[in-house]
Image (spheres, grey):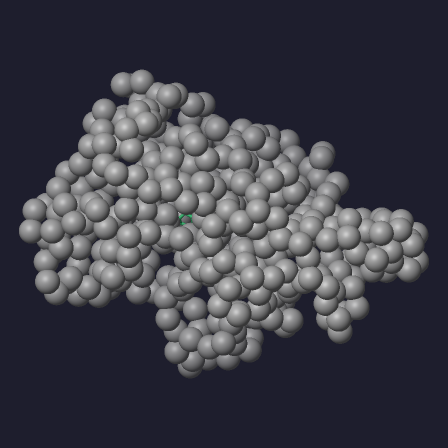
Amino acid sequence: MGHGYRFPMIGRRGFIAGAAALGALPASGGALGALAHETDDTVFTSAFPQKGRMILQRTRPPLLETPFEVFDQGVFTPNDRFFVRWHWAGIPEQVDVASFTLTVHGHVDRPLTLGLAELLAMPRIEYAAVNQCSGNSRSLFTPRVAGAQWRHGAMGNARWVGVPLKAVLDRAGVKAGAVAIRARGLDEPVVPDAPAFAKSLAIDHARDGEVMIAFQMNGEQLPLLNGFPLRLVVPGWYSTYWVKMLCDIEVLASTDDQYWTKVAYRIPDTPHASVTPGETGYAQVPINRMVPRSFITNLVDGARVAAGKPLALRGLAFGGDQGVAAVEVSADGGATWRRANLDRDQGRYSFRQWHLTAAGPATGPVRLMVRCTNTAGEAQPLEANWNPNGFMRNVVETTTLTAA
Ligand SMILES: Nc1nc2c(c(=O)[nH]1)N[C@H]1C(S)=C(S)[C@@H](COP(=O)(O)O)O[C@H]1N2
Ligand SMILES: [Mo]
């Protein structure tokens, strides 16, 4: 509290980045695409405001993926390499911080309109949390499914600072009988009569004291494309709920029947949200909490390593909506596992780095598997899940090397 956080890069005129690039064409790509997590036809771009070199998935609306090598560089994902995903292309190119407001209305005693200065004056909370798209790693689904063909880079970890959503709801006074809040941002559909992106959370979840209205990411203001000036952070839950450019919170007295909650982002109500391709008639529920995942980050598929020499491995893991209890590595297809060393604990919702020196591999192909178990005892499955939206991949990943 009282640290005098300001928006250092903006004045009264608001956001000042090369915002024209929002509509720009991708920079020429491919040239540096030699890392095995990216293929020869991967297109890179550095043309988006406040973003460094990213994998271009789509230009309008922008879908930018974090190149995998970034995950080997630290436990936090730098803001300028953090992935970007929007549903509609109607994204403001700048936001005027002096006139921006957040409105809280609906089933409340006192509808509110808060300016940024008022929010910045409220008591703050801070924690690290992974923001991961429901469709992260979708390109690995077999059979292939429609949607952005993300590799593993539709995720990132940041330290978030903001105010608890609960504190703002308390100021408005939630009335008895409220069942949910629905959040939306400044972005707008570009198709007539299409539904603006909005997501709802159950009222108890919204008031758990952890769900945050964030204004700081890794010690800086949010990049425009990550939701400047405010976004919801819903730790442990998929990022579809992490509404960016948050400007409107409606307290609902009945369940949300709008498209983005009622129809979109639903998963089969089955173990691992998994069904058989072609299967129909199964029950569905809104996507919700994340599940554990882990990655080797210092070696990618196709890397050559020295036979007979100890092999230094390191990577990232996260527990979903729980902390990381263990990370294990197998070099024999899952028959035996060795426990990795866990690096510093940055909190339950954060990435956790791990490292392990594996025995020198014999000459030939080496298949390394990595598995995370979270503090609730939930481990990554050995078999990949499948669903028609390509959501919630969390199978134990395998990295194939050649020892020579
Ligand atoms: N206002 C708004 N917020 C949004 C979205 C959107 O389209 N509009 N997309 C959601 C989805 S599906 C994802 S994956 C995350 C991506 O967050 P990021 O762009 O900061 O990485 O934003 C979420 N919040
Ligand atoms: Mo997403």
Seen in the image, is 264 located left or right of residue 171? right
The residue depicted at 85 percent of the width and 52 percent of the height is: 310
Vertical relation: 306 (above or below) 145: above
The residue depicted at 39 percent of the width and 21 percent of the height is: 9
Residue nearer the viewer, 102 or 277: 102
Q: How many marks?
A: 0
Vertical relation: 66 (above or below) 281: above
Residue nearer the viewer, 167 or 396: 167
Give the x, y percent position of residue 322. 47, 60
Give the x, y percent position of residue 128. 45, 45
Q: In which quarter of the view is residue 143 placed? A: bottom right
Seen in the image, is 167 located left or right of residue 389? left
Give the x, y percent position of residue 6. 32, 24
Q: Quadrant of the N terminus?
A: top left
The residue depicted at 45 percent of the width and 40 percent of the height is: 159
Residue 323 visible within the image: yes
Residue 192 visible within the image: no
Give the x, y percent position of residue 240. 40, 53
Vertical relation: 397 (above or below) 38: below
Residue nearer the viewer, 148 or 171: 171
